[in-house]
Image (tube, rainbow, N blue to C red):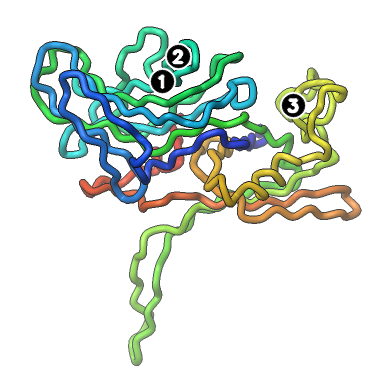
């Protein structure tokens, strides 16, 4: 059996959990559209198509200028639906998203062809930002595709947008890893009744607990080719190039920055979701230096939107990503 891979984002340059549209300014080209916030957790870009010409509306956040040599990675979680919240995979309003640099831009959803994208379920788009640039603003756009769509109301949903320094792969799970996603019940005792009344209360947030050997230094997936200590950044390079002072420094930074970084995007083998680092304990015993971590699933709202739509387990934990 292969060893589980655990990755976490770190070092936010920009994070919008899509619970406040204040900093986004609108522009429209033929499309009547509105940005609203649902469940304190999602942006809804709701537009009505009425022309066979190109119709779109965009929203721009003029962020603090950020170097793409420092903040190198991005993530955005999104989906597309009709007006009733039913997912659509084509023919309606799709999503385009851009980083606008002080010189030029990069289409991060839509790619080089800049074709609006669709996803009937929640999906995540991530990648590397063009190096050597300064990001001046972020633009998200609801755009009809094909342009012949001349009727209907559609919604582009966005859950979060993250610009960060990078993604850190924990080198091992030497002492075990547990993923727990328990249901939640209230067991109500009633006098003279045999058995309690069981009331379903939804589910608890998922948790991930794992113990790591800090003395085991190399990435399990690249042990033969990797040199140096991969508890230090940058990973998979020789020791002389390291910038961290101590092993696992990145995790202490995540803990230290929790007051300004609400969550991270966590990948645990075949699962991906927003999570907070709840516990970090360094132990010294006869087995050496052991690091115990606990992550907890994070969500501002519940997993239902205003249409009564509930995320599937595939969407909730990104099992299809």
Residue lying furthest top = 113
For the point 84% across and 21% down, which residue is it? 238
Q: Is residue 219 visible?
A: yes
Q: Which label was assigned to residue 98? A: 1
**What residue is disc 3 on?**
235
Q: Secondary structure at mark 2?
A: strand
Q: Marks 3 and 2, Cα distance to the nearest angstrom?
A: 28 Å
Seen from the viewer's position, the closer of residues 47 and 78 is 47
Seen from the viewer's position, the closer of residues 93 and 189 is 93
Q: Quadrant of the N terminus?
A: top right
**What residue is disc 2 on?**
105
Tell me the mark number nearer the camera, choosing from 3 and 1. 1
Question: Mark 2 and mark 1 in contact (Cβ < 8 Å)?
Answer: yes
Question: Mark 2 and mark 3 in contact (Cβ < 8 Å)?
Answer: no
For the point 72% across and 49% down, which residue is it? 211
User: Mark 3 Cα within 10 Å, few/some/many (few <14, many 20+)?
Assistant: many
Whole-percent x and y of residue 218?
Answer: 79, 30
């Amino acid at each position: 059996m292969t060893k589980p891979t655990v990755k976490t984002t770190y070092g936010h340059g920009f994070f919008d959990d899509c619970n406040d549209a204040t900093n986004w300014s609108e522009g429209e080209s033929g499309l009547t559209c509105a940005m609203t916030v649902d469940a304190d957790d999602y942006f809804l870009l709701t537009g009505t198509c009425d022309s066979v010409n190109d119709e779109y509306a965009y929203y721009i956040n003029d962020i603090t200028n950020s170097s793409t040599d420092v903040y190198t990675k991005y993530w955005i979680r999104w989906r597309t639906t009709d007006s009733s919240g039913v997912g659509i995979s084509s023919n309606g309003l799709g999503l385009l998203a851009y980083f606008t640099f002080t010189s030029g831009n990069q289409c991060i959803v839509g790619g080089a062809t800049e074709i609006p994208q669709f996803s009937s379920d929640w999906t995540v788009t991530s990648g590397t930002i063009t190096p050597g640039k300064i990001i001046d603003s972020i633009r998200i756009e609801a755009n009809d595709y094909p342009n012949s769509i001349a009727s209907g109301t559609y919604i582009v949903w966005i859950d979060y947008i993250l610009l960060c320094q990078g993604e850190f792969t924990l080198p091992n799970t030497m002492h075990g890893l547990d993923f727990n996603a328990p249901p939640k019940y209230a067991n109500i005792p009633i006098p003279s009744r045999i058995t309690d009344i069981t009331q379903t209360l939804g589910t608890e947030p998922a948790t991930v607990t794992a113990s790591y050997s800090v003395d085991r230094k190399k990435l399990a997936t690249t042990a033969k080719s990797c040199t140096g200590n991969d508890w230090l950044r940058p990973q998979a390079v020789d020791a002389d190039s390291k910038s961290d002072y101590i092993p696992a420094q990145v995790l202490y930074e995540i803990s230290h920055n929790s007051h300004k970084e609400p969550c991270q995007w966590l990948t645990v083998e075949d699962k991906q979701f927003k999570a907070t680092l709840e516990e970090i304990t360094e132990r010294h015993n006869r087995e050496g230096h052991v690091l115990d971590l606990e992550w907890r699933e994070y969500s501002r709202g519940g997993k239902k939107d205003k249409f009564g739509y509930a995320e599937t387990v595939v969407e909730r934990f990104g099992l299809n990503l």
